Image: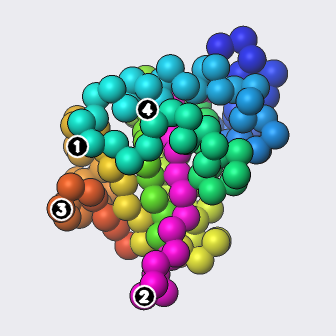
Amino acid sequence: MNQIQEIPVTVPGGNIPVLIAKDNIPFVWSMIEPRLQIIIDKQEFVDFDAPHVYNLLLLEQAQLWIAGNGEMIMITRIGNYPNGVKRLIVDFIQGTNYKNYKEHMEYIEHWAIQLGATQAEAEIQPGLEKFLIKEQGWKRRRVKIFKHLNKGLH
């Protein structure tokens, strides 16, 4: 946890998620990996293990977000589908305080919209549905939840 203090994770006057640069991933990984492993251990059928996530981050094929002075971490990707859809994919969310989740997620959605994303999908842990589906406009489809992204911040 000491290493994370060397990298700013909040913006003065705000509580927005910070996208961790590729060069900083090795410095924060010792704090991120155990939290990521908690999620992986709880899920039965995961697509990625922690070393794979680390490699995706270093290859800039995935993004690591840290919000609220480390209270929440999120691993995302931008997926390009053959039908022309560009989608924000939330692979992992882990946090200790979900009260600011809406604000954090809106910021990340806005970032994805700027990259051309028009949809979002997330695989979530049981218990997070109440924060996503009812309050955030997500729809339960199959095992994942989905939503259309609106332009701009609210």
Residue 130's disc number: 1
* Distance between mark 3 and mark 4 Cα atoms: 22 Å
Q: Is residue 134 left or right of residue 124?
A: left
Residue 134 at what x, y percent from top left? Answer: 23, 53
Task: Give the amino acid type for the residue marked by disc 4 in the picture.
Answer: Gln
The answer to whether 132 is drawn above or below residue 139 in the figure is above
Task: Give the amino acid type for the residue marked by disc 3 in the picture.
Answer: Arg
Residue 102 at what x, y percent from top left? Answer: 43, 47
Disc on the earlier residue, 1 or 4: 4
Q: Is residue 31 left or right of residue 36?
A: right
Residue 110 at what x, y percent from top left? Answer: 57, 63
* Residue where numbered disc 2 is placed: 83
Q: Residues within 10 Å of mark 3 (few under 14, many from 20)?
A: few
| Residue 71 located within the stretch drawn in magenta | yes
Disc on the earlier residue, 1 or 2: 2
* Residue where numbered disc 3 is placed: 142
Helix, strand or loop at label 1? It is helix
Task: Give the amino acid type for the residue marked by disc 1 in the picture.
Answer: Lys
Q: Residues within 10 Å of mark 4 (few under 14, many from 20)?
A: many
Tag 2 and tag 3, C-beta contact below 8 Å? no
* Residue where numbered disc 4 is placed: 94
